[in-house]
Amino acid sequence: MKNIGTLYGRPIGQFWEDLELWEYVLNSFPEDHFQWIVEFGTFQGGMSFFLYGQAWARRMKFYTIDKNPPEKFVPCFNQLDLRNGLPKHWTFLKDEPGVLFCDNGNKPAEVYNYYSLIHPSCLIGVHDWGTEFNPRDIPSELRPYRSSATTIFLGRSDFLNELESEVDIPEHWERPYRDESSPI
């Protein structure tokens, strides 16, 4: 399987089915349920432009974060190092439901360190499912909701309790995982 390559003139690591999954997931909830999308890992902004378009069309806030700036303009880019945490004034993460997208350097640590800091009715999308993020990396308080070949969406069990999961995870998988050597 080959990734898209470029989107909006910028490199992107996702596949078309990942973008279809985003559309499906966002359309599965009432239009006003999610209030924001925050992307960890801007890279050169290909996925950022897609997520910005999703947020704009749905009247949601959008932020994309990376410690290295992209070569070209990316809307709503914030140069931040996740090892230093998020801005204190970003209270919307805890106060409003949204979607956190982990696609930075250490996806297991990003999920583990940030899932408890966001609203309980949020979803967490993780790219590189099956390679950089695996079943053992899912904290016990979260459960899978939907996935493509390379992206998975997770949510808190109490939030997703009535929603059917369409992710096949083997019954015998290790959890939770925490990389103690992680910088974040």
Image (cartoon, rainbow, N blue to C red):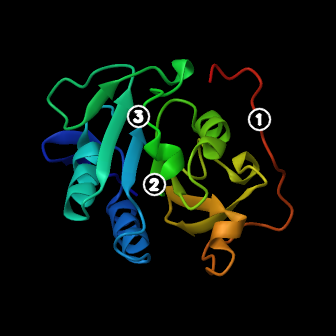
Q: Mark 3 vs mark 2: which is more N-terminal?
A: 3
x and y percentages locating residue 83 in the rendered image: 55, 20
- Residue at the spot of label 3: 41
Please tell me whether mark 2 or mark 1 is closer to you in this view: 2
Please count the marks in the image: 3
The quarter of the displayed image where residue 160 is located: bottom right
* Disc 3 to disc 2, C-alpha distance: 14 Å
Instruction: Give yes or no for contact between labels 2 and 1 (Cβ–Cβ under 8 Å).
Output: no
Residue closest to the eye, 9 or 23: 23
Q: Position of residue 94 (x, y in %)?
A: 54, 46
Residue 32, picture quadrant: bottom left
Q: Amino acid at mark 1?
A: Arg
Residue ID for mark 2: 99
Label 1 and label 3: CA atoms lie apart by 20 Å
Residue 143: image tag:
none
CA–CA distance in space, label 2 to label 1: 22 Å
Residue 159 % position (x, y): 64, 68
The answer to which of marks 1 and 3 sits earlier in the sequence is 3
Residue corresponding to mark 1: 178
Q: Residues within 10 Å of mark 2 (few under 14, many from 20)?
A: many
Q: In what quadrant of the picture does the N terminus appear?
A: bottom left
